[in-house]
Image (tube, rainbow, N blue to C red):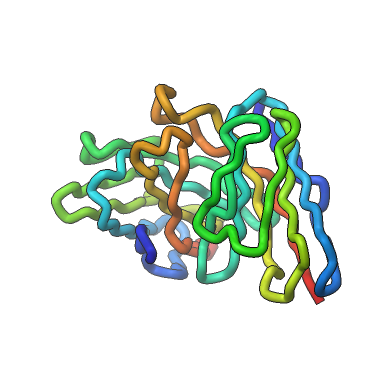
Amino acid sequence: DVKVTQSSRYLVKRTGEKVFLECVQDMDHENMFWYRQDPGLGLRLIYFSYDVKMKEKGDIPEGYSVSREKKERFSLILESASTNQTSMYLCASSRPGQGAPYNSPLHFGNGTRLTVT
Amino acid sequence: QQQVKQSPQSLIVQKGGISIINCAYENTAFDYFPWYQQFPGKGPALLIAIRPDVSEKKEGRFTISFNKSAKQFSLHIMDSQPGDSATYFCAARVPDSGYSTLTFGKGTMLLVSP
């Protein structure tokens, strides 16, 4: 069974701090994603990666960066946390879409609830 | 720009009733339409999915109805149970992305009352 593990369930950080959210998957998936979830706004894609050291911007990349040094690990970085980044952050992984069957679902972690004060 | 519009935002259904959640889209190039189910404290998980060349897909009590001409699809939960209480997201796959990138609706919070 695919497991996506996010290192922290809850985080409280101060405005201006540099914040690292870590995600590890154990199924050798090429694709990894970071979403943020806000009430009434659904799931919005921040960044994704389709290979080690590769990254692509999603819909809301401003204020974030990512790092993927190993295939199984994908980190989301808030260079200078702000209060509007208080949110639930969800990491996900999947097999490649290109050439893969349609049913290559996203496997999500249980989320990190980040509060920036 | 919201590419997938989902309604209603919340829904209360009595046990045994039918829950219906609707989604509409504009991009006719979308090629895959999954629904994800999220329980409190958990990440979303794939529930059921459909391709646009099929008008209906059924898995147990869950059915997707797809209307290509109207650019709408919906999730029907028959004989709704309290254990179905969760947030449901419809989604559409971004075409030609090659990366299984999905765009999600805003979610529907379903409460099934006992």
Residue A12 image offset from top left, x and y in percent: 84, 67
Q: Is residue A12 above or below residue A22?
A: below
Which image quarter is the N terminus of chain B in? bottom left
Residue A96 image offset from top left, x and y in percent: 50, 28
Question: Residue at position x 77%, y 66% from top?
Answer: A80
Question: Residue at position x 78%, y 72% from top?
Answer: A116
Q: Nearer the viewer, residue A102 or B73?
A: A102
Question: Residue at position x 74%, y 54% from top?
Answer: A77
Which image quarter is the C terminus of chain B in? bottom right
Q: Look at the image and tell me whether residue B79 can be seen.
A: no
Residue B20 image offset from top left, x and y in percent: 35, 58
Q: Is residue A18 above or below residue A84?
A: above
Q: Quadrant of residue B94?
A: top left
Q: Nearer the viewer, residue A114 or A71?
A: A71
Residue A101 image offset from top left, x and y in percent: 41, 24
B27 relative to B39 in the view: left or right: left
Q: Quadrant of residue A10?
A: bottom right
Question: Residue at position x 30%, y 44% from top?
Answer: B30
Q: Nearer the viewer, residue A19 or B44?
A: A19
B108 relative to B43 in the view: left or right: left
